[in-house]
Amino acid sequence: MNLIQNTILTSLPVGRKKTPSGWISFNAPCCVHNGETADKKKRGGVMTSADGTVSYHCFNCGFKASYVIGRKLTYKMRQFMGYIGIPDDTIRKLAIEAMREEEGDKKYEKKKFVTFKRKELPKHTRSLGEWLEEYTVGAMATDQQNKIDNLLNYLAGRGIGPDWYDFMYSSDKYWDVDKRLLIPFYWRGDVVGFTGRMFEQSDKVKYYTDVQPGYVFNMDAQDWTRKFVIVTEGPFDAITVSGVSILGSEINDIQRELIDGLGRKVIVVPDRDAPGEKLINQAIEFGWSVAFPEWDKSVGDVADAVLKYGRLFTIQSILKTTESSKLKIDLKRKMYG
């Protein structure tokens, strides 16, 4: 954690809480400075990343600010620092420190930062929490209530709590979006894509996904204190064990760079199918570790394991069966077929 990140995190308002997707939420201090009423619903959020980035987003008045290590401290970020009570002289010192890093550290001048474009979510999208508030007070049409019921039943059937991630929902009927649970893709605090998982019967595909090449799901939510990162194939797998997902069974160069950039032990948990073999081969090539948990044959992936055994046992079983050498990885995959 760098000095700017640390100063911001230690200056955040009291009553803050961390969401499953990595946001630290609190009552937004910017609204009263931008012509809006004071926020009392914790609509302000800070996101930090292992590469030194820190982002702020107010979901009430729309104010945004970010800092990327190796770049200048922007005017909006200095504004945000003032909003949360950081003294002016401290902000000036941090701005000078940021300039020194930009000018003096050549590795940042030469480094190409991986970026993803901001994307819009489907029309009428709101957080699942907001839909549930409306649902609870009975201010929702019957057909809409039925859909929320079906969505909640789908999550319960997978053993996933509605508060495990920043799940969203839209009433938009295009491509049956109103029959899908929306999982937004975040990058440095911005929405850069999403996937929509069908929770009702439809003739449309199970997943409707808008993803940019090289994206790794759940990077923003990684725990700084963990000495490892669990790499899974699907987003639900990643959510259930606080890992990351490559959104498939093959890793490209950008994804490898991003995951290696976390600077911790990489543990791959492939699905138990043919495509999972490709992932094992890539893990060996990259020098990553592979886990071979001794789960029941009915368990096909990490999310299935969490449903059957619970989160804690699943993570422990992954860590206990991790192999790092090529010889042992090859031996284990022959043993478990």
Image (cartoon, rainbow, N blue to C red):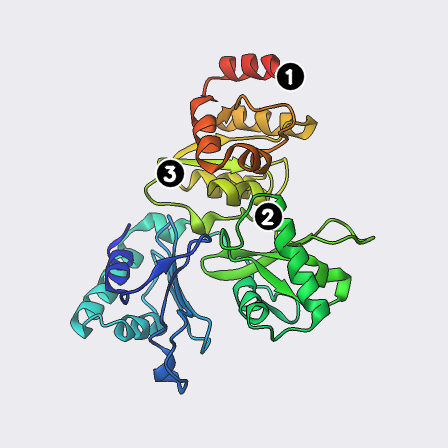
* Residue 108 in sight here: yes
* Residue 112 in sight here: no
**In terms of image quadrants, where is residue 336?**
top right
Q: Which mark is residue 156?
A: 2
Q: Which residue is depicted at the point 36% across and 71% down?
A: 27
**In terms of image quadrants, where is residue 333?**
top right
- Mark closest to the chain's N terminus, 1 or 3: 3
Name, please, the residue furthest toward the left.
89
SS of the residue at dot 3?
loop
Q: Is residue 221 left or right of residue 85?
A: right
> Which amino acid type is marked by label 1?
Gly
Q: Which mark is residue 263?
A: 3
Q: Which mark is residue 337?
A: 1
Q: Which residue is depicted at the point 25% across and 56% down?
A: 6
Q: Which mark is residue 240?
A: none
Q: CA distance from mark 1 to mark 3?
A: 31 Å
Between 99 and 244, the one nearer to me in the picture: 244
Depth-wise, is mark 2 or mark 1 nearer the camera? 2
243 shown above or below 267: below
Question: Which image quarter is the C terminus in?
Answer: top right
Depth-wise, is mark 2 or mark 3 nearer the camera? 2
Residue 51 place in picture, x, y as percent: 38, 49
182 shown above or below 224: below
SS of the residue at dot 1?
loop
> Which amino acid type is marked by label 2?
Ala
Q: CA distance from mark 2 to mark 3?
A: 35 Å
328 shown above or below 262: above
Between 51 and 194, the one nearer to me in the picture: 194
Depth-wise, is mark 1 or mark 3 nearer the camera? 1
Q: CA distance from mark 2 to mark 1?
A: 31 Å
